[in-house]
Every structure is written in C-alpha cells, then in structure tokens.
Image: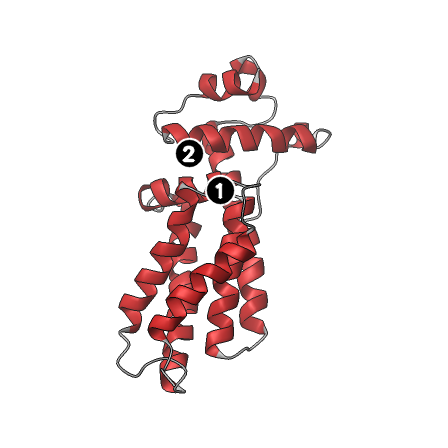
Amino acid sequence: MPISKKTTTDKQAPGRRGELLATAAEVFAAQGYTATTVRRIADAAGLLAGSLYYHFDSKESMLDEILSTFLDELWAGYDAVLAARLGPRETLEALVTESFREIDRHRAAVAIYQREAKDLAGRPRFGYLAESQRKFERAWLGTLERGVADGTFRADLDVRLAYRFVRDTVWVAASWYRPGGAHSPEEIARQYLSMVLDGIAVRT
C-alpha cells in the first residue's frame, strides 16, 4: 500500500492540509469523484480554486491521499488483530470492532471507497485498491473458515455467503453513521455482533 503523497510546499502546513483533505472527502462522498471539480472543493474550503494547487497538484492526488490514508490505518488495525492469533470468534469480533472504528474516523473515505473503488482500481495510481480488497477477503474468509474447521462456527455455514453478509452489513454503516452520535463505534459493534454471531455460532 503506498505511502500518502505530500508536496514539499505543504510540509509547513500539515494542519491545513488535513482540513482540506477532510473537506475534499466530504465533497467527493456527496457528489462523486467524477462530478466533483477542483473549484467545488475550493468553494467548500473557502479558497480560490488556484489556491488549492499550492497544497495538491490535482484532485486525483487528493483522492489518492484520502483513500491511502484510510486503508493504511485500516490495515494497521487489522494486522494487529490478525497478529494476536485470537480464536476465530474473537478475531471476528475484533475485526468488526476495528471496522466500525475506521468508519468513525473515516466515514467519508469509506463512502468514497464503496462508490469509486471498482472504477479506480483499473488505474495504475490506484492499483493498491484491488490488492487491499484481495487481502481483506483473505483475512475475513480465513477467519470464518478457521471457525468452521475448529467447531466454533456451524459446519453447514457457507463461508463465502457469510463473508459477504458480514462485510456488507458492517460497511454499509458508513451511509448512516455520524461521529458523535448516541452510540460509540464499540457499542455499535457490540450490538451488531450480538445479532450476527447468534446466527453463525454453534448452538449449545
């Protein structure tokens, strides 16, 4: 996964850069990447369009940094979970909780990823999106398969169907979740897991 790209002229203003990326992410999430112009982002940020080029060389650079930052943080969390070598149920619980934490931190980036990743993955600059998706699938499918093999999850579980269900129902939360709401990401994960795991765990 690439390191986020930053122009040398912006090293003195990391705070402002972050603010501009957050603004761009919200605009991309609301309007779509193709429909969003540099002028629209500049207007939302209270800048002249030309001023954005002091910080970024293109809107593609902004999108790249938004997505790569989100995925770098997501995989830092996921890799820590997988390295802990927990049992299948505990691993699944930790992956779900980490996912909701990333939705809390990067809601707009998640929405962009869901909307744009399929089209962007074919561009050389965004090739890391396809690799991230493959890695994501291996992590989740592997956890479910391990749980079936050791008797944690039901023997008749269709792991690929379960993976798709869990993946989609977790990440769709980006469409309604708002940071600072009534429930923390950890509480949402707990409620979600109590519903999902009762359906796939072995009944005792």
The residue under the point 44% across, 65% down is: 193
Q: Are marks 2 and 1 in contact (CB under 8 Å)?
A: yes
Vertical placement of residue 87 versus 174, above or below? below
Q: Residues within 10 Å of mark 1 (few under 14, many from 20)?
A: many
Q: Which residue is mark 1?
A: 107
Quarter of the C terminus within the rendering: bottom left
- Secondary structure of residue under mark 2: helix
Nearer the observer, 174 or 121: 174
Q: Which residue is mark 2?
A: 29
The image position of residue 105, as x and y in percent, is: 56, 45
* Image side of residue 95 versus residue 152, left or right: right
Question: Is residue 74 visible to us here?
Answer: no
The image position of residue 146, as x and y in percent, is: 41, 80
In terms of sequence position, does the residue under pointer 2 or pointer 1 come before the other? 2
Q: Amino acid at mark 2?
A: Ala
- Secondary structure of residue under mark 1: helix
Nearer the observer, 86 or 112: 86
Label 2, label 1: how many angstroms apart (C-alpha)? Answer: 9 Å
The image position of residue 127, as x and y in percent, is: 40, 49
The residue under the point 31% across, 61% down is: 165
